[in-house]
Amino acid sequence: MVAWGPMITGRLFVPEYDDWQNAADPLLFKSAGKDIAELPMRSNGLPFPLDQMIVDTSHNPGRRILRNGFIEALGHRMWLGAEFFRRVPGADRAAILAAEWLRPVQQPDGVVEITASDAPFHDDSSAQLQERLRSLLFPMSAG
């Protein structure tokens, strides 16, 4: 038997949308024939000769952020394990379960299942909903 450890979170997402929301290397855009002229840019923070300008994804609604002990990421449907509430600073099970706009369901095994949208997040038309969801699930990112 393999011991996988505690469940933190699961999510459903559109891989292509997720990839482009988090793509920072200008060469990815160039090879796909995508224009980056209107995209925000920032330094990658590396010393010369490794320094370069990259796409700033820090305000994208579908951004993923590597945190200490978990990955901050969203999906239109998500499952939050008991470990989620231990690892995510400020995560409030009661507030999530009270958010009727999420259609939350407390499962018998302690997992909280949430549905923010019937359709997967696939473009910026759901940006406001994604930011609302991020603020509720990951309050340390709000602001």
Image: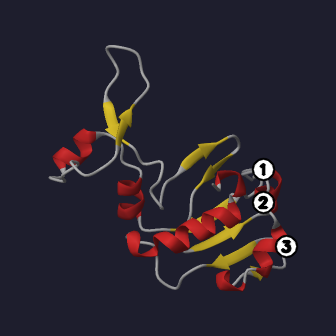
The Cα–Cα distance between marks 2 and 1, rounded to whole angstroms, is 8 Å
Q: Residues within 10 Å of mark 3 (few under 14, many from 20)?
A: few
Judged from the image, the secondary structure of the residue bearing numbered disc 1 is helix
Q: Label 2 amino acid?
A: Ala
Kindly tell me whether residue 75 is visible in this rendering: no
Kindly tell me whether residue 7 is visible in this rendering: yes
Location of residue 81 with respect to 69 vertically, above or below: below
Q: Which mark is residue 87?
A: 1
Location of residue 55 with respect to 72 vertically, above or below: above
Image location of residue 35, percent across then percent down: 18, 52
Image location of residue 139, percent across then percent down: 71, 57
- Callout count: 3
Residue contact at pointers 2 and 1, CB within 8 angstroms:
yes
What residue is disc 3 on? 94
Q: Which mark is residue 91?
A: 2
Image location of residue 45, percent across then percent down: 44, 25
Image location of residue 118, percent across then percent down: 52, 85
Judged from the image, the secondary structure of the residue bearing numbered disc 2 is loop
